Amino acid sequence: MLMTSAHNSGIVSLTSKRRGSMVMKGGIYRRDGATGPRWVVRYPGKIWRRFRSYEDAETFLIALNFKSQEGTLDPRDYRADAPLGMETLARKWLEYRVDSGVRDTRHAKAHMGRAVAFFGNANIKAIGAGELEDFFACLRRSTDLSGKSLHNIRTTLHTFWGWVARRERIEIPVFPEIRFTLGWRKIVDKDTQARIIEEVRSITRDVNPRIYIGILWLATYPSVRPLELIHVREQDVDLANGLITITHNKVPTQYKRLYLLPEDVDLVRALPRGLPGAYLFRHDARPGLPASQRGRFGRDYFYRWWRRACGNLGVQGVDLYGGTRHSTVTALGEHFSPEEIMGNGSGHTTNKAFARYFQIHADQRRAISAHARPAHHLHMEFVRVGIRKRLKKG
């Protein structure tokens, strides 16, 4: 047994002794407090642990030495700052994603929040296949998450574990399989889509023509998503060549090119231009507007106006994605092959050969976009009149 000299207060350092054939490392220290003595174990590798009794402290120190002797001691498992803790690593991973340029971490934060709520700051090495099965079983019992949502959480956690394995040199556990069946979004035919967008034009005429233009483009260019569109800035618009560069993507190292139809170039020309860093889809800068109505459109702004237009026409159960992107791609299937639609839809450019084929790709994509355009007449005067009225109000 490691012995201490008689001492009633303060810190007493205990000298390490030889126990059998094992040389004991580390020490036990006494701290006297208002509620009695406490015993602290300190061991090389930043290991620090506090105990109520000397016997518990000694048992812990002996266990550390045995693990060290047999070569299985990982100091990270016992450090007070818990470097391998689930909560600790989840926080670092989310910070890493932001630093790496991942723009939208909302879902990752939510998914990791559920995992941390279940596992706490447990050592990640102690979380295996069984513990993961228990986690997903708990989610099924205590939430109404769909199979797709559970699968998305599984994907996030697997990505997180891959980062941890590379960083901390640990093994990735076997993840449970999550089976799900994707539901179908409700879509509309092209005539109904055109009527809804015409209604959007009507109800936003005196509000902001950019609302109508944005929703019209979501139906015309299925390669672009609402979140990508609202992050387009003035500097991303090249009216001379009729294209917009989409830089706010899921993959930060890639970008998309949106090839505008001539009438859409005219629509943008009719809008007041802003500074290069200004968002193209933005609220008015009129004095007196509340903060919520200034700056870039919010992530659900297009959807709210789409829903209002659908309500005015009695169209039910069709969300913005289903009524624009999905309906358009379905209609394009009558004129183009899946390969042609996918080629137009991806819009990614990642190699230097792009410049050689620029004109061919641009013409092909504009041809597809012309078929995708909702069948109603563009009113350039709509944009001009709307702007004049809003200027008078300001």
Image (spheres, grey):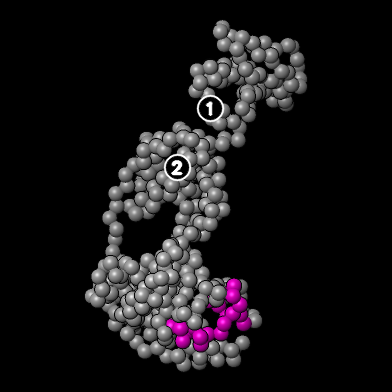
The residue identified by callout 2 is 161
Q: In the depicted view, which residue is nearer to us: 117 or 391?
A: 391
Q: Residue furthest top?
A: 20
Q: Quadrant of residue 24?
A: top right
* Residue at point 63%, 29% (across, down): 46
What is the magenta range?
264-286
* Residue at point 48%, 88% (across, down): 383
| Residue 142 higher or lower than 288, as above or below | above
Crowding around mark 2 (Cα neighbors within 10 Å: few <14, some 14 to 19, many 20+) is many
| Residue 214 higher or lower than 377, as above or below | above
Q: Quadrant of residue 137?
A: top left
Predominant secondary structure in magenta?
loop
* Residue at point 51%, 59% (across, down): 103
Which quarter of the figure is the C terminus placed in?
bottom right
Report the amino acid beneath label 2.
Trp
Q: In the depicted view, which residue is nearer to us: 328 or 111?
A: 328
Query: Residue 222's spot in the image, x, y percent?
Result: 36, 71
Crowding around mark 1 (Cα neighbors within 10 Å: few <14, some 14 to 19, many 20+) is few
Report the amino acid beneath label 1.
Asp
The residue identified by callout 1 is 74
Looking at the rendered structure, the secondary structure element under dot 1 is loop
Report how far apart the C-alphas of labels 1 and 2 lie in the structure: 19 Å
Query: Residue 134's spot in the image, x, y percent?
Result: 38, 39
